[in-house]
Image (cartoon, rainbow, N blue to C red):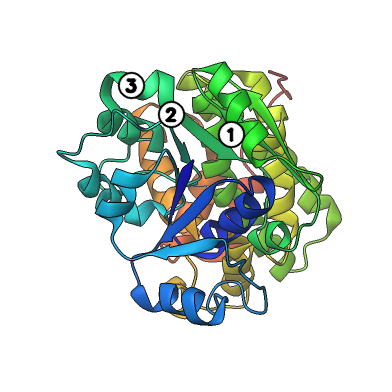
């Protein structure tokens, strides 16, 4: 089969490397918005901007035309930041994609222009084929560790459970294990909302507020993610799995997390604009916070942690916002 990976950032490159190790009989193409990234891959077998010092196997071929790649592909892995989703969508318009076997999305965010979930955008692209061909991949999976063949486990969800099992088999090997599922909404929302919470965890670490604060924060963050997700049709149990709790733990705890890095920088007094401008990679949590905050207001959902992080990103004082969070009216601990 021909597999096309759309996006040669850290995660897209890592997935390409994973596929080259898990499915040696297949041909792997990788496309990116920046041709210079593809040139590095072609000539140096490296991606110095996103995964420095990690060799990219020769079985991965740079693809300079996304249109050509889409027409050739049997399976597509879409690994673009949410801000690039609209550009990808345009390339699928007016194309005959009836021959595609599967589209696997690994984007952890929302469609910026419409505030829709990523799966809703792919539903628009795939039309009637959506339920039979679409999958979402998410879980605790730092790109650097996957590219180095460190042990990882994730979730792959599709309305077509047999397809989810097929793609799980495609990507799995002795160091990477994929669990199949059917809850697309839960898997994608777990992957998106944990980025908001990672900013808060970074603030806690940057201010040296301690382990007690971190444990409480992660626990209450999970409650908030469940509240949001179940409101939109996700299954509660999904958030106790790899794409929920698993991803939340790793993103809130690791220095490899871009969103955690943003929180630490905010705690050091830096402005969000300066932090973003000095980052090569995209911290999805910044835009996701604004979108989820607005959606929660529209649906009258109680999202205090998201609200505080939103206000901090908008320039509010960190310590005042933390005090506001801690001095809210007390309540019973309700278990979902």
**Location of residue 78 with respect to 94 vertically, above or below:** below
Q: Which residue is mark 2?
A: 134
Of the residues under marks 3 and 1, which one precedes in the sequence?
3
Q: Of helix, strand and loop, which one carries label 2?
A: strand
Q: Which x, y percent locates residue 281?
A: 50, 69
Toward the viewer: 179 or 42? 42
Q: Which residue is mark 3?
A: 129
Residue at the (68%, 61%) spot, across then down: 147
Q: Which residue is mark 1?
A: 225
Residue at the front extreme? 25
**Location of residue 293 with respect to 286 vertically, above or below:** above
Q: Is residue 24 left or right of residue 159?
A: right
Q: Is residue 121 left or right of residue 200?
A: left
Q: Between marks 3 and 1, how big is the CA–CA gap?
A: 29 Å
CB atoms at circles 2 and 3 under 8 Å apart?
Answer: yes
Residue at the (73%, 65%) spot, across then down: 205
Q: Which x, y percent locates residue 13?
A: 55, 62
**Location of residue 134 with respect to 138 vertically, above or below:** above
Of the residues under marks 2 and 1, which one precedes in the sequence?
2
- The quadrant holding residue 80 is bottom left
């Amino acid at each position: 089969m021909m597999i096309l990976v759309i996006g040669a950032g850290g995660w897209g490159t890592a997935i390409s490397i994973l596929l080259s190790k898990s499915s040696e009989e297949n041909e792997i193409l990788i496309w990116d918005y920046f041709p210079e990234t593809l040139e590095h891959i072609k000539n140096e077998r490296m991606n110095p901007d996103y995964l420095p010092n990690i060799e990219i196997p020769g079985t991965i071929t740079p693809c300079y035309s996304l249109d050509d790649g889409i027409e050739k592909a049997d399976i597509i892995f879409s690994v673009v930041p949410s801000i690039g989703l609209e550009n990808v969508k345009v390339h699928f318009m007016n194309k005959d994609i009836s021959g595609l076997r599967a589209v696997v999305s690994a984007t952890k965010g929302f469609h910026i222009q419409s505030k829709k979930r990523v799966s809703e955008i792919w539903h628009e692209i795939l039309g009637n084929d959506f339920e039979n061909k679409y999958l979402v991949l998410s879980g605790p999976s730092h790109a650097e560790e996957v590219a180095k063949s460190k042990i990882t486990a994730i979730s792959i969800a599709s309305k077509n459970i047999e397809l989810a099992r097929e793609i799980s088999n495609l990507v799995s090997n002795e160091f990477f294990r994929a669990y199949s599922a059917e809850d697309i909404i839960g898997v994608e929302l777990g992957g998106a909302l944990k980025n908001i919470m990672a900013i808060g965890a970074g603030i806690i670490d940057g201010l040296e507020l301690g382990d007690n604060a971190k444990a409480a924060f992660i626990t209450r963050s999970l409650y908030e993610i469940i509240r949001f997700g179940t409101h939109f049709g996700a299954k509660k149990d999904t958030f106790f799995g790899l794409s929920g709790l698993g991803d939340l733990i790793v993103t809130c705890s690791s220095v490899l997390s871009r969103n955690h890095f943003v929180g630490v920088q905010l705690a050091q007094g830096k402005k969000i604009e300066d932090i973003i401008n000095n980052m090569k990679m995209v911290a999805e949590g910044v835009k996701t916070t604004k979108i989820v905050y607005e959606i929660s207001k529209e649906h009258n959902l109680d999202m205090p942690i998201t609200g505080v992080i939103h206000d901090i990103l908008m320039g509010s004082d960190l310590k005042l916002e933390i005090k506001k969070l801690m001095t809210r009216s007390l309540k019973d601990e309700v278990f979902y």
